[in-house]
Image (cartoon, rainbow, N blue to C red):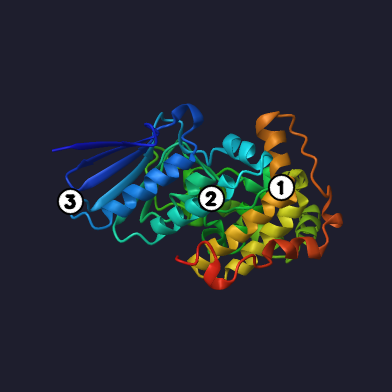
Amino acid sequence: MEERLTASDGELLATVRAGVATITLNRPAALNALTHGMVRGLADWLQRWRTDERIRTIVLRGAGGKAFCAGGDIRALHDLLRTADPMARTFFEEEYALDFAIHTYPKTIVAWLDGIVMGGGMGISQGAALRVVGERTRMAMPETAIGLFPDVGGSYFLSRLPGQLGPYLGLVGPTLRAADAVYCGLADLDVSATPAAAELEQLRPAIDAHFRHDSVEAIVESLAGETQAEFRDWAARTREALGRRSPTLLKVTLQQLRRATSLSLADCFRMELNLINACMEQGDLVEGIRALLIEKDNQPRWNPATLAEVVPAAVHRFFEPRWPATGHPLAHL
C-alpha cells in the first residue's frame, strides 16, 4: 500500500511504499531551488522517519528533468538581506542543521542527481550514502561568483577531496559532468549510457601544482606562469574566472578550506554559520546576487575591488567567534 504526502504547499512530495520513502523536490520552474518551507518540511519528515520501522531507505529526487536542485532560493534571500530580516539567519541555521542530519542519518539515503546540482542541492545530497549521477548531471559549487563561499557543508566535503581539487572547485566553481563528479569523490555511481573520460583527471597535475599555494595571489601568479601547452588555455580561463569573483570571498574561501581539514563535520557547519553571518554584513553577497541574478548586468561592484586591497584583518573578521561555544545556534549538532 502506498502513502502519499505533501509539505510546504506542494513544494515537497513524498511517497512511501515497500520500505522506501521517495521525496521529490517540486519546484521545477525554479529548478527545485530550496525555500525555507522546503527545508523545514524535509527536516520534519527525516526526523519522523528516523524511528519509523516501515521505512528503510529514503530517495531524494527533483521534479521536471532539468535539475535535482539548483541551490537555495536566492531571490528570496536577496529580499531578506536587503531588509535585514532576521529570517535570513534562521534559514541558514535550519538549512545547515538539515544538511548535518542527512550526513549523519541512521538509514540509507540515496540522492538521484539528475540535471543541475548546485549550492543547496549539494548540501542535501553530499551526505547521502549513495549519490547517483548521469548524462544530464551538471554539478558545481559556484558561490564565490555571487560573493559567497562554498557553504552547506562544502567546508567538509570539498576539503576532503584528493589533492587540490577542493580549493579548485571551491574557488573557481567549474561545472562538473558525471564522470568528473565520480572522479573527484562527489558522486558514487554514474549511470550514463555513454560514459565519458573525466576531464579533471587530465587536469589534475596542473590543478595540484597551481592550487597548492596558501594565498589566492600566489595561485593567480602560478596560473599566469603555466607553460605546458596542454594546460595553458585552461590556466588562462581559470585565471580569468578568478578575476571575476569577489576578492574578499576568494580569500575567505581558501582560508575556510584550509582550516576545515582539521575540523569535524559539526565544527565545519558551525564555522560556516559564522561565515554566512559575516557575509550578510560585508556586502559582496547582496551585490553579487544583484549583479548576476536580479538585474543581471554581470558587473558586480566588489568591495574592495582587487585582491591587493583585501587586508588580512578583513579576512580574519569572518572567522571571529560570534557566540560562546555553548551558545552557538548549532551547538546541538
Q: What is the C-alpha distance between the residues marked 1 and 2?
A: 35 Å
Which amino acid, mark 3?
Answer: Arg
User: Which residue is labeled 1 in the image?
Assistant: 238
Q: Position of residue 317 (x, y in %)?
A: 73, 63
Are the residues flagged by discs 3 and 1 in contact, CB closer than 8 Å?
no
Give the foreground label among 3 and 1.
3
* Label 2: few (<14), some (14–19) or many (≥20) C-alpha neighbours in 10 Å: few
Which is more toward the observer, 218 or 284? 284
Tag 1 or tag 3, which sits nearer the N-term? 3
Are the residues flagged by discs 1 and 2 in contact, CB closer than 8 Å?
no
Give the foreground label among 1 and 2.
2
Query: Does residue 216 show up?
Result: yes
Quarter of the image for residue 213 reads: bottom right
Residue 215 higher or lower than 325, as above or below: above
Tag 2 or tag 3, which sits nearer the N-term? 3
Tell me the tag on residue 90.
2
Are the residues flagged by discs 3 and 2 in contact, CB closer than 8 Å?
no
Quarter of the image for residue 76 reads: top right
- For the point 43% across and 41% down, which residue is it? 38
Query: Does residue 262 show up?
Result: no
- For the point 46% across and 35% down, which residue is it? 32
User: Which residue is labeled 3 in the image?
Assistant: 54
Q: Position of residue 245 (x, y in %)?
A: 73, 46
